[in-house]
Amino acid sequence: MASKEEILQKAKNAIESFNKDEAVAAAKEALDANIDPVEVITVLTEGMREVGDKFDKGEYFLPHVMAASEAMKVAVAVVEPALKAGAKAGDKLGTVVIGTVEGDIHSIGKDIVATMLGIAGFEVHDLGRDVPVTEFAAKAKEVNADIVGSSALMTTTMLNQERVEEELKKAGIRDKVKTMVGGAPITQEWADKVGADAYAESATEAVVVAKKLMASLKEVKGA
Ligand code: HCB
């Protein structure tokens, strides 16, 4: 029987070699071997990052990236039910509105963040990708959100995270919500620059950050 490390390596390799069948098989094998689904998602993400790095270096081209994203999607779909099954029942931690900003169709990372927040106990309203900046504020108002999370993967679209902040102010709810920004080009410096309340580097960190934001929101509201 393959060891845990071997199975996880297989899953990562499957993404890096854009092999959907192997990605699905490795994800299933991981679940059968009782490997924590969060660990599986983490290695799949690492695989996707490697593909991104190779794309950056000119070793891979867009069709490779598209094929790798497909492999990532099907593997995540295998693991997701197990992640959800492990979700803690109990009180809702808070309400989150999340989406990838206008002009940006990258959704893999945002999807993982949305899933992990849901599993942690947040009510998540996922607006999808290429979301008009006005929609973040409108949805936040509609569902009385505690946190508005935005994702941006391109230097050109990250500017729209600042516009999300502005729209929340225009809607008169900026002081009622906490904001979290993320995505590959995003940094803490960027979060500070646009006036976001927090930056999260990964989906697991997004959960930690969201819980901290809830605590600070409760302090502000005196709850
Ligand atoms: Co895309 N792409 N792409 N792409 N793509 C990037 C982002 C580049 C950096 C690649 C490069 O040139 N080096 C680049 C952007 C350059 C720039 O900054 N200006 C780029 C480009 C240019 C483009 C197109 C314009 C290419 C073209 O058509 N010529 C086009 C975009 C069109 C558009 O959006 N209008 C495009 C298309 C694609 C796809 C469709 C082939 C595919 C996306 C599939 C999909 O998402 N459904 C794709 C992919 C996969 C990538 C790379 C290779 C990987 C992105 C990814 O999924 N990473 C990426 C290279 C890279 O990022 N280095 C490349 C894996 C996930 C798990 O990581 O960072 O997204 P993540 O998310 C993390 C983390 O950031 C955090 O948690 C997640 C999980 O741990 N997080 C949050 C994310 N969002 C958060 C929100 C929060 O509130 C909190 C935390």
Image (cartoon, helix red, strand yellow):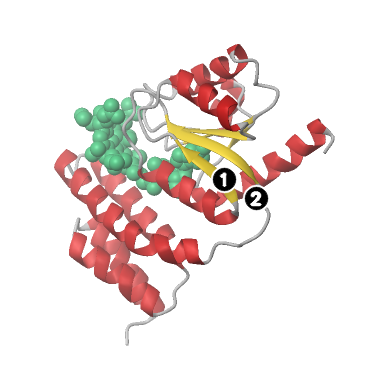
Q: Residue furthest right?
A: 222
Q: Position of residue 220 (x, y in %)?
A: 80, 31
Relative vertical location of residue 129 with respect to residue 206 in this rendering, above or below: above
Residue lying at 44% horizontally and 78% vertically, measured from the top left:
34
Residue 57 in view of the camera: no
Residue 85 relative to residue 218: left or right? left
Q: Earlier in the sequence, mark 2 or mark 1?
A: 2
Kindly indicate whether the residue at mark 1 contacts the one at mark 2 (C-beta within 8 angstroms).
yes
The answer as to whether callout 2 falls within 8 Å of ligand 1 is no
Residue lying at 25% horizontally and 56% vertically, measured from the top left:
16
Label drawn at residue 11: none
Label drawn at residue 123: 1
Residue 196 in view of the camera: yes
Asked which secondary structure carries label 1, the reply is strand
Of residues 152 and 146, the one drawn nearer to the viewer in this rendering: 146
Q: Residue furthest front?
A: 142
Q: Quadrant of the C terminus?
A: top right
Three-letter amino acid code of the residue under disc 2: Lys
Relative vertical location of residue 210 with respect to residue 220 in this rendering, above or below: below
Number of disc labels:
2
Q: Quadrant of the N terminus?
A: bottom left
Q: Position of residue 124 (x, y in %)?
A: 52, 43
Q: Position of residue 82 (x, y in %)?
A: 44, 66
Which quarter of the rendered image does ligand 1 occupy?
A: top left
Label drawn at residue 92: 2
Write down the quadrant of residue 61 in the picture: top left
